[in-house]
Image (tube, grey):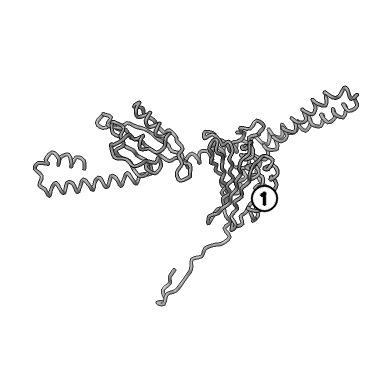
Amino acid sequence: MRYFIERALKKLAKLTRDQVEELLIQSAGEIDRLETVMNSLTEGVLVCDQNHNLILTNKYAEHYLPIGAYEPGGQPVWASVRDDTIAEFLEHTLRNGDKALDREFTVEIKGIRRLLSVSVLPLVKDGHVTGSLVHVQEITERKTREARLRRAENLASLTTLAAGVAHEIKNPLGSISIHIQLIQKAIKKLPRNQRGVLDKYLSVVNEEIDRLNHIVVDFLFAVRPMNIEVREGDINALIQDLVDFVRFELEAAHIETRLDLAGDLASIEFDERYMKQALLNLIKNAMAAMDSGGVLSIKTEASESEVYIHISDTGVGIPEENLSKIFEPYYTTKESGSGLGLTLVFKIIKEHQGEITVNSKEGKGTSFQITLPLPRTTTRLISYTRDTAGEDGV
C-alpha cells in the first residue's frame, strides 16, 4: 500500500478529482486497519519522533502506563506518562540516547498492583534513527508463576533433606538435655555458694536447647507431608475464636482489631487445626510489624466459587524487592525468627487447594489475601422441554 501511495503521489498532478478521492479513501482505510491492529495488540507500543515527542500509542499502553491526554508531536513522551518513576526513566534513557530492555516497574491500576516490563528501542528506517519505540508488557502473572515454581522447588529440596538432617539434630539435643538435667541434680548436692554460677550457665544452655528444638520441630512441620482432614465448617467462627484468643496480646500491644466478617458466608471445607495455625501465624506477623501499635483488619467475602480472607496491618510494610521472597524457607527479617512461619502458611493454604497473595508498601502496611474454594455440593442440570409440535428442545 505504501508503494502504491508513493507512486500515486509522484503522479498527483495528473490525477483526476475522482482518482484523488479514491486515493484518500484507500489511505484512510489503510490507516484505520493499522490502528485496529495496534489497538488489538496485547502489549503496549509508544512511538516517538526524533525530538522524543509522543506521536502514536495504542490502547494497551494508555491503560497500563497510563497515558494522559496528548497532542501527537506536541510534547515529550515522559510528560504524557502519569507515573513519576517511569516518566523519569524514559526521560533519562531518551535524553542520553540509550537503549533499555525489560526494566521492571510496579504501577497501581484501580487499586491493584501490576508489574510492567518497559523497553526503549531506536526506531530505524533505511539505516537511520528516525525516533524511538517504547514497548510495554504486563508481566505480573508470569512473575507470580515463577515465584510459585521457585517456592515449590525449595519445598521439594527441604523435603529431601528433612528425614536425615532433622533427626540427626534432634537426637543429640535430646541426649544433651538429659545429661544437663543429670548435671543439675549433681550440682544441687554442692554447697549453695558453689552452685550459683553453674546454675546460671546451665540455664542458658537449656534455653538454647529449647530454641533449637523449636527450630527442628518447625522444620519437620514445614517439610513433612500434611495429613489434612477437611470438614465443612464456618471460617468466620474460627477467625472469631482466634481473635478472642489473642485479644489480650493485641490490647497490650496497643493494636486495634477491626473485623468485617461476611454475614452470608457459605461453609467451606478446611482442617481446623492447620487453618488455625496458618491464620495465627499471619496475625502474629502483623503484630510483630506494629511494635508501636496500629490497626489489624480481618475481612471475609465470597464470590460464586471462592471465599476470600483478607488480613491487613498498618505496620512497617515489606520492601518491594523482598515481596517475592517472603514465602521462601528461612527468609526472615526478625532477629529471633526461624524463617519458616510464612512457609508453613503457604504450604497449609496450598494443601487446602487455595492461594495466598501479598500486597505491601513500606511504611504503610501489609495485606495478605487467602483464596479458598467453595465445595461443589450442587450440580447444574440442563432442563429438557418438548414443544407443541413434538420436537425436542433444550
Q: Position of residue 35 (x, y in %)?
A: 29, 45
Residue at coordinates 29% horizontally, 38% vertically from top-left? Answer: 55
Closer to us: 314 or 115: 314
Direction from residue 191 to residue 157 in the image, left or right: left
Secondary structure under the numbered disc 1 in the rendered image: helix
Q: Position of residue 335 (x, y in %)?
A: 65, 30
Direction from residue 319 to residue 186 in the image, left or right: right
Residue at coordinates 29% horizontally, 36% vertically from top-left? Answer: 74
Work out whether residue 159 can be spotted: no
Label 1 Cα neighbours within 10 Å, binned few <14 / some 14-19 / many ≥20 = some
Residue at coordinates 54% horizontally, 35% vertically from top-left? Answer: 362
Residue pointed to by mark 1: 272
Quadrant occupied by the C terminus: bottom left
Work out whether residue 284 can be spotted: yes
In the rendered image of this protein, does residue 377 appear above or below residue 178?
below
Farthest-out residue, left? 14
Type of residue at label 1? Answer: Glu
Q: Quadrant of residue 343?
A: top right
Closer to us: 207 or 161: 207
Q: Position of residue 236 (x, y in %)?
A: 63, 53
Quadrant occupied by the N terminus: top left
In the rendered image of this protein, does residue 357 appear above or below residue 179?
below
Direction from residue 40 to residue 196 in the image, left or right: right
Closer to us: 243 or 214: 243
* Number of marks in the rendered image: 1
Residue at coordinates 62% horizontally, 54% vertically from top-left? Answer: 269
Q: Position of residue 154 (x, y in %)?
A: 58, 36
